[in-house]
Amino acid sequence: MKQYLRIQLLMAISLLLIPLSGFSQKSSQQSENPAPFPRLISSGNPEADKINYEKAVQAWKDQERQRIERIQNQPGSTDLSNKVVQKEKSGVTTPASQSSFNKNVREITIVDLPGYPKYLVTGDPVQDEKLYQLAKAKWMDENPVLYKKYIQDHSGDSGKKSERRKSESSN
């Protein structure tokens, strides 16, 4: 009998926890994640592939810009327009509030390009991501040639054919 009551109690508790888990999933999905960067897809026609890829990259940039604007315009988000970025003489892009460089801030280099913003870890991941995405979008707009060259160099198809290494053994 005790076993039966214990099972009923566990079932009742689990039924109460199901709505709570759904609530936590909804609240975690409210913050938007960045869309994945488009990949170059080969269809056999390099010119058409390049045009389609450039269109996909432009669509991605527009989508990211809109996502960042939505994040900024959400109620409860702080106004980042006055804090967004300030360029120092070294070319490192940092939030204006961190220009004195707090000891608790860590810089992470994600892309090694001149003037490309570094991801700053301040302890607030949501704001860190917002600042990084804004700085990145601003850098892409200011340096389209450098950005395009970087994408071409780091896309899956660099235009070079790989060659098999020749064996050094003499038979």
Image (cartoon, grey):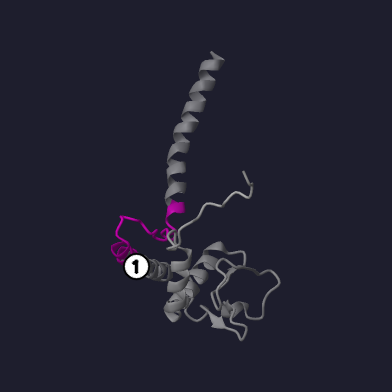
Residue drawn at point x = 60 percent, y = 49 percent: 167
**Over which residues does the magenta segment extend?**
27-53
Question: Would you say residue 87 sits in the magenta stretch?
Answer: no
Callout 1: 10 Å neighbours few (<14), some, many (20+)? some
Amino acid type, residue under disc 1 in the picture: Glu
Task: Locate residue 68 relative to residue 108 in the image: left or right.
Answer: left
Assess whether residue 28 is covered by the magenta stretch. Answer: yes
Identify which residue is drawn at 51% across, 27% down: 10
In the picture, measured across the screen, residue 170 lies left or right of residue 86, that is right
Residue 27, relative to residue 94: is it above or below?
A: above
Question: Taking the image as drawn, is residue 77 in sight?
Answer: no
Residue bearing the label numbered 1: 54
Q: In the visual, does 124 lie left or right of 159?
A: right
Q: Residue 23 location, x and y as percent?
A: 43, 47
> Residue visible at 46% across and 42% down?
21
Decide if residue 54 is on the left or right side of residue 34.
Answer: left
The residue at the far right in this view is: 103
The answer to whether residue 73 is above or below residue 86 is above
